[in-house]
Structure formats: C-alpha cells, structure tokens
Image (cartoon, rainbow, N blue to C red):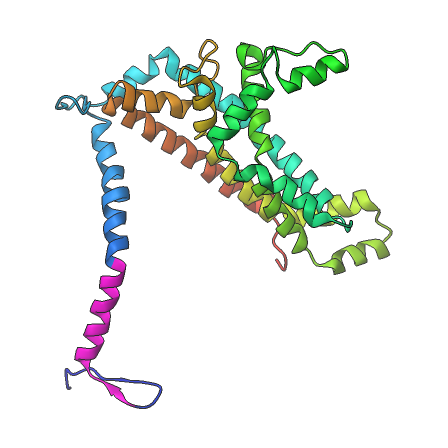
C-alpha cells in the first residue's frame, strides 16, 4: 500500500501529503500563542500553587517543604474563620436575593409597555460602572453624616444607621451595593423569558389559568435553566468577592474585620505578608469549596431544572 496520502478536494484535485503537513503546521503556528499563554499563565501557576501550598515559600526567601503545616495553621487562624463567616454570610443572602429580584425585574421589563427599551437600558447601566467607582459612589451615598440615603430616611422620620461604620450593617450594605449592579443577570433572565413559546401561555389561558398560575406553572419551570446558570455563576462570584469591600475599607476589612472577605485575606497573605505558601493553601481550600458547591448544584439540577422538549 502506498504511504503517500492524498486528499480529494471539492474540485476533485488531489492534495499531496506534504501540502497537508504544511497546512497542519500553519494551524499549529496560529494556535501556538494561545497554547503558550495557557501553559504559562494558567497551567504553570495552577500546578505550582499545589506545590507551594506544602512549602514555606515567601518570594523573599527560599521556601522549604512543610507538609500540611499551612493547612493546620489555617484551621487555627481566627481571622481565617472570620473571613469564611463573612463570605458565607454574603453568599447565603446575596445569591437568593439577587435571583428573586433579578426574575422580578426581568418580568417587569418584559411587559409590553411603551419605551421599555429605555427602562431596560437604565437597569443595565450600573453594570458598566467599574467596581472601584461604584465603591466611591456608595461611600458618599451611605455616609451617615451627609449621605443621600440617610437624608432620605430622615425626610420620612427614620434615623439612618451608620451603615459601613457598624458591624451589624456593614455586610448588608455590601449586599445592597452588589444588588445595584445585577443588570447583567436581568438581561439573561429577559432572554430566558423571551425564549418561552407563547403557545404555552395560550394553552394555560384556555385551561382558565390566571397570571399567578401561569407564572407558577409555565414561566418558572421553563426559566429554571437560566436560574441554574445564574445560581452557579452567582455562587462563584459571591465566594470571590474582593474589589468592592477592599476599596471601601482600603484593605482593612473594618469595622472589626466585619468586611474581611476570604479573597481579601488571601490577597493580604500573598502580596502584603508574602506568605505564598499560606496563600496557596487558602486558594486551594477556596477552589475545593467552590467546586464542591458547584457539583452539588449540578447533581441536584436534574430534580428542579426543566428543559423545553424533555
């Protein structure tokens, strides 16, 4: 059998094996920058961080192998547990509230009202504001002395709390600020609502269903794939909360570390104290935690996510 490989083109002309190899080489040359970037900036840091998490590496001095010492030290670190508590508090409240408000807003913005595109744009605009700028804006709005929020509350006879200056109100304030920028999720819910066929609503009306029953039995079940997506993305984002609290507190996590989130403490260990081994251990604990939660959501999805045509 001849070893020469020929391929018939659409025009019926044969392409010799050498030409095929040249095309393959050209393809590899085009994708090589992406492969190099993946290996250098993703694969190498990922796998090296596993090794560093078992060492005392700190950039300034050569590390040595310490086994599970970084992990055992973390479990004895009070600030580590405080940061986990703050992050879980934020995720448990922010994710469900953002899903509920996102669906409610999307349903309002899906109504057939004149000028609806303008309303949709208004709700999406806050997502275009950088997180640092948003933090500066909300520092002014929530200022207990001259902030607009407390001024409005005082107008109706309510004495506003110190917001970011209080341990009790600091985390709710962060949740409130984060909800202001959920326009992107609303757009995804709007796309999901637009994908529901009108025939289902017509059939429900024939059966005598009102608005509430159509929402409960048609809209919500067929919107579950979108809710599933936003739930997973919301969980991942909530557990990586960083820019907003870091900017608001200038990295201090004040008052009384009530705004010290997990990634903030990881960042401090890596780039303030140069404890790269300790920070790498924190990164892998976070990775395992997020992967476990995501896996639970995926495993339970078959019981509550409904796809059209299935």
The quadrant of the picture occupied by the N terminus is bottom left
Q: Is residue 283 left or right of residue 55?
A: right
Rendered location of residue 48, percent (x, y): 21, 35
Where does the magenta region start and end? Answer: 13-31
The quadrant of the picture occupied by the C terminus is bottom right
- Residue sitting nearer the eye, 94 or 293: 94
Rendered location of residue 250, percent (x, y): 41, 18
The count of marks equals 0
Q: Is residue 217 left or right of residue 178?
A: right
- Residue sitting nearer the eye, 23 or 117: 117
Query: What predominant SS class does the magenta segment belong to?
Result: helix
At horizontal 62% and vertical 46% (from top left) the residue drawn is 189
* Farthest-out residue, front: 146
Query: Is-magenta flag for residue 112?
Result: no
159 w.r.t. 86: above or below? above
At horizontal 26% and vertical 66% (from top left) the residue drawn is 27
296 w.r.t. 191: above or below? above
147 w.r.t. 37: above or below? above
- Residue sitting nearer the eye, 189 or 299: 189
Rendered location of residue 286, percent (x, y): 38, 29
């Amino acid at each position: 059998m001849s070893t020469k490989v020929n391929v018939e083109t659409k025009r019926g002309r044969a392409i010799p094996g050498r030409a095929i190899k040249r095309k393959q080489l050209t393809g590899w040359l085009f994708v090589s920058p992406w492969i190099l970037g993946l290996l250098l900036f993703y694969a190498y840091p990922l796998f090296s961080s596993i090794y560093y998490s078992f060492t005392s590496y700190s950039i300034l001095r050569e590390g040595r192998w310490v086994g599970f010492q970084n992990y055992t030290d973390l479990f004895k670190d009070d600030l580590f547990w405080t940061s986990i508590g703050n992050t879980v508090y934020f995720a448990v409240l922010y994710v469900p509230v953002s899903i509920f408000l996102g669906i409610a807003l999307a349903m309002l913005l899906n109504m057939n009202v004149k000028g609806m595109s303008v309303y949709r744009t208004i709700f999406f605009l806050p997502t275009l504001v950088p997180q640092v700028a948003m933090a500066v804006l909300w520092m002014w709005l929530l200022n207990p002395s001259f902030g607009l929020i407390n001024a409005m509350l005082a107008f109706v006879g309510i004495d506003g709390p110190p917001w970011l200056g209080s341990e009790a109100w600091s985390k709710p304030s962060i949740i409130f600020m984060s909800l202001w920028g959920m326009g992107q999720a609303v757009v995804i819910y709007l796309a999901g609502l637009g994908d529901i066929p009108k025939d289902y609503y017509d059939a429900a009306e024939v059966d005598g269903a009102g608005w509430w029953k159509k929402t409960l039995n048609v809209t919500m079940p067929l919107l579950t794939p979108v809710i599933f997506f936003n739930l997973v993305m919301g969980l991942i984002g909530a557990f990586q909360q960083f820019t907003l609290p870091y900017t608001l507190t200038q990295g201090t996590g004040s008052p009384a570390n009530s705004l010290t989130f997990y990634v903030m403490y990881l960042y401090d260990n890596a780039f303030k104290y140069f404890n790269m081994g300790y920070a790498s251990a924190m990164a892998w604990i976070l990775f395992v935690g997020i992967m476990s939660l995501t896996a639970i959501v995926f495993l339970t999805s078959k019981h509550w996510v409904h796809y059209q045509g299935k």
